């Protein structure tokens, strides 16, 4: 069992930056690939980025490439999402998710554990 708690969301102007954090409970954090997803009002949850268990591999959605950076600190049981050059269309609730696998996947249903989400609002 893994419990995930996101933080770092908020209101930011377009072009600004935010750093999201996702803290995980348990002693097996390094066994999980960690993903970030987001869900805007009236839209389906969409994949943003995933990082491998060791942090050596990442996979980004096209919308995140060049602007967002995922990282993890297994000693702190935490995964981060640095978001730069934010756009109004990035407004959403951002969720972190965990999958006990070496495989990087973009499908939300394949993740076993989810946080409660943190709201990001980007004003124009």
Image (cartoon, rainbow, N blue to C red):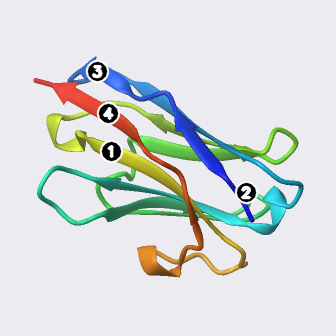
Using the image as rendered, state which of residue 39 and residue 52 is in the foreground.
Answer: 39
Residue beneath disc 3: 11
Q: Secondary structure at mark 2?
A: loop
- The residue that appears at 41% across and 29% down in the rendered structure is 9
Q: Earlier in the sequence, mark 3 or mark 1?
A: 3
Mark 1, Cα crowd under 10 Å, few <14 / some 14-19 / many 20+, is some
Q: From the top left corner, tell me how far across and down residue 92 is, in percent.
A: 26, 44
Q: Quadrant of the N terminus?
A: bottom right
- The residue that appears at 55% across and 73% down in the rendered structure is 111
Q: Which mark is residue 65?
A: none
Q: Earlier in the sequence, mark 4 or mark 1?
A: 1
Residue beneath disc 2: 55
Find out whether the residues at labels 2 and 4 contact each other: C-beta distance under 8 Å. Answer: no
Tell me the distance, in whole angstroms, between the alpha carbons under discs 2 and 4: 24 Å
Tell me the distance, in whole angstroms, between the alpha carbons under discs 2 and 3: 28 Å
Tell me the distance, in whole angstroms, between the alpha carbons under discs 3 and 1: 12 Å
Residue beneath disc 4: 120
Q: Earlier in the sequence, mark 2 or mark 3?
A: 3
Q: From the top left corner, tell me how far across and down residue 52 is, in percent.
A: 69, 65
Q: Quadrant of the C terminus?
A: top left
Q: From the top left corner, tell me how far across and down residue 75 is, in percent.
A: 88, 42
**Residue 103 visible in rendering:** yes
Q: From the top left corner, tell me how far across and down residue 99 is, in percent.
A: 64, 72
Residue beneath disc 1: 93
Mark 2, Cα crowd under 10 Å, few <14 / some 14-19 / many 20+, is some
Report the mark closest to the observer, 2 or 1. Answer: 1
In the image, 63: left or right of 110?
left
Q: Secondary structure at mark 3?
A: strand
Find out whether the residues at labels 4 and 1 contact each other: C-beta distance under 8 Å. Answer: yes
């Amino acid at each position: 069992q893994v419990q995930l708690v996101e933080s770092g969301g908020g209101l930011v102007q377009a072009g600004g930056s935010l750093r999201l954090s996702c803290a995980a409970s348990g002693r097996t954090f390094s066994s999980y690939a960690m993903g970030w997803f987001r869900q805007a009002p009236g839209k389906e949850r969409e994949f943003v980025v995933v990082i491998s268990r060791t942090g050596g591999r990442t996979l980004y959605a096209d919308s995140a490439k060049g602007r967002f950076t995922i990282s993890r600190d297994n000693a702190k049981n935490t995964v981060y999402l640095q978001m730069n050059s934010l756009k109004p269309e990035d407004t959403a609730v951002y969720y972190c998710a965990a999958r006990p696998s070496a495989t990087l996947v973009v499908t939300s249903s394949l993740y076993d554990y989810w946080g409660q989400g943190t709201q990001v609002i980007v004003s124009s």
